Amino acid sequence: MPDNADNAGQPGIPHIEFRDVVKKFGDNTVLNDLNFTVAKGERVTLIGPSGSGKTTILRLVMTLEELTGGYVFVGGDPLQYEDRGGKRQRVPDKVRRRTTTQIGMVFQHFNLFPNMSVLENIIEAPLHVMGLSKAEAIPKAEALLEKVGMADKRDFNPSQLSGGQQQRVAIARALAMDPEVLLLDEVTSALDPELVGEVLTVLKDIAEETDISMLIVTHEMQFARDVSDRVMMFDEGRIVEEGAPEKIFSSPESQRTQDFLRAVL
Amino acid sequence: MNPSWWDWNHAATVFPLLLQGFKITLLATVLGTLIAVVLGLVVAIIRRIAPTIIRNPVTWVVEFIRMTPLVVQLVFANLVLSPYIESTLAIGIWVLGIHYTTYMAEVYRAGIDSVAKGQWEAATALSLPVARTWRAVVIPQAIRNTLPALGNYAISMFKETPFFVVIYIPEMVRVAQTYGGDTFRYTESITLAGLIFLVASYPTSLLIRRLEKKLA
């Protein structure tokens, strides 16, 4: 078990587990021997200066970056590498994909498919990954569009939508896969200030109505305070401090956290 | 009054013959383009994802074809293949198509590279299988970016069909030369052949330019 397993805010089974994780880009070590867990249904926000490795953590969970060392587990399944007979072995792509179907991700730059309509974006994975029929996938997509307030835009192209609208579609697209883990990577950072609210409102509703585990990287401290069960402060690839949002934001212990919060709040 | 170098009677006689030859020119262009469009995509994908053991030989062949003239390839292929393939036209079309395959592969490569990294990442995030990612996400976006270049290569292929003359395929320019040889009247036939090329390719190039603007 990771050494921080008895920290506050994570009772129950680990839903996401980082074990001895090392990530290097060339000679640059971004994460060095990182251990932490996220419990089922827990919402964890990663804060810290840029370059501290927060986004890399999300990208490792989504298998967008290759692990240099160590293991990541989701729902107990090894994601990229597994220990087989004492040897660290790469998990085959097919098995990886089976595990990643439990994980959804929303990106800073939305990354909607421009060659598909809003509806097609949302039903793409349900049709071709989950194997739903159109008759099943379309009503489900429409319900999700309703939820994110985009029902009237189902036949639009992404390029016809504002940033906030595109991001709400991207959220619906991620939810269409019924993820158990949702990764939110600076989802409002590319938006005009007046569009941030509509996206955060949608996410807060989802956080309230579901028990999806969430790993969040954001600069919106109020949002972090509202939705998180736990906040982890990162610096130079290490967890500097972690705890309940009230504690981290109101009375941080570490000098590094105090400095960081003073700079951003 | 007629100048001595131009005779309308000859022009009128050769014109329908030229149109017969033009049919072969068109056929070669259409089929050659089709070959280049399909094989070019296959080559581009192989060069992108296949293991080195397959990728390297494909790269060598592609470089070899690009670095040798079409005329030499036509003569060579005709010498080597004529015992096995009866139709010289078929040989010519395949040589032309494969020659342009190597150029189209480069166009596709650029098109594939132009697909944003975030698109691949979104596909991974949705756990789309690799084949589906290519078919539904990458190729449609890559092809959109390659349409103008594809059109330009089709025109340039069209204009290179006269090289078929070296393996005696009766396309338009060969017809023009034969007529000239038989009657000693080259000017009318060659001029008209050139005009037919111009009339066909100029509007096409305008269309492509419009397409370019629309996609930009």
Image: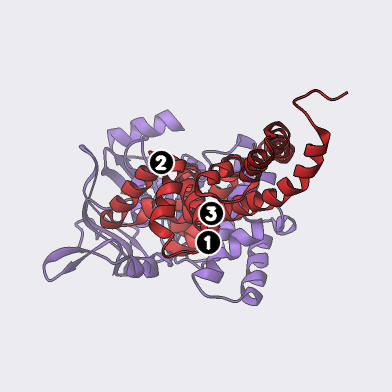
User: Given contact means CB atoms under 8 Å apart, are the residues at marks 2 and 3 in contact?
Assistant: no
**Of marks 2 and 1, which one's residue comes earlier in the chain?**
2
Front residue of A104 and B64:
B64
Q: Colour of chain B?
A: red
Residue under circle 1? B87
Tell me, yes or no, if residue B38 can be seen here. yes
Distance from the alpha carbon under mark 3 to that under mark 1 = 10 Å
Question: In the image, residue B145 lies at what x, y percent?
Answer: 57, 43
Distance from the alpha carbon under mark 2 to that under mark 3 = 17 Å
> Tag on residue B66?
2
Question: In the image, residue B181 lies at what x, y percent?
Answer: 63, 39
Badge nearest the viewer, 2 or 3: 3
Question: In the image, residue B134 lies at what x, y percent?
Answer: 48, 58
Label 3, residues with CA under 10 Å away: few <14, some 14-19, many ≥20: many
Front residue of A93 and A184:
A93
Q: Colour of chain A?
A: purple
| Residue A27 drawn above or below residue A146 | above
Front residue of A211 and A262:
A211
> Tag on residue A167?
none
| Residue A103 drawn above or below residue B73 | below
Callout 3: residue from which chain? B
Residue A83 lies in what quarter of the image? bottom left
Which color scheme does this rendered protein use?
Answer: by chain
Badge nearest the viewer, 2 or 1: 1
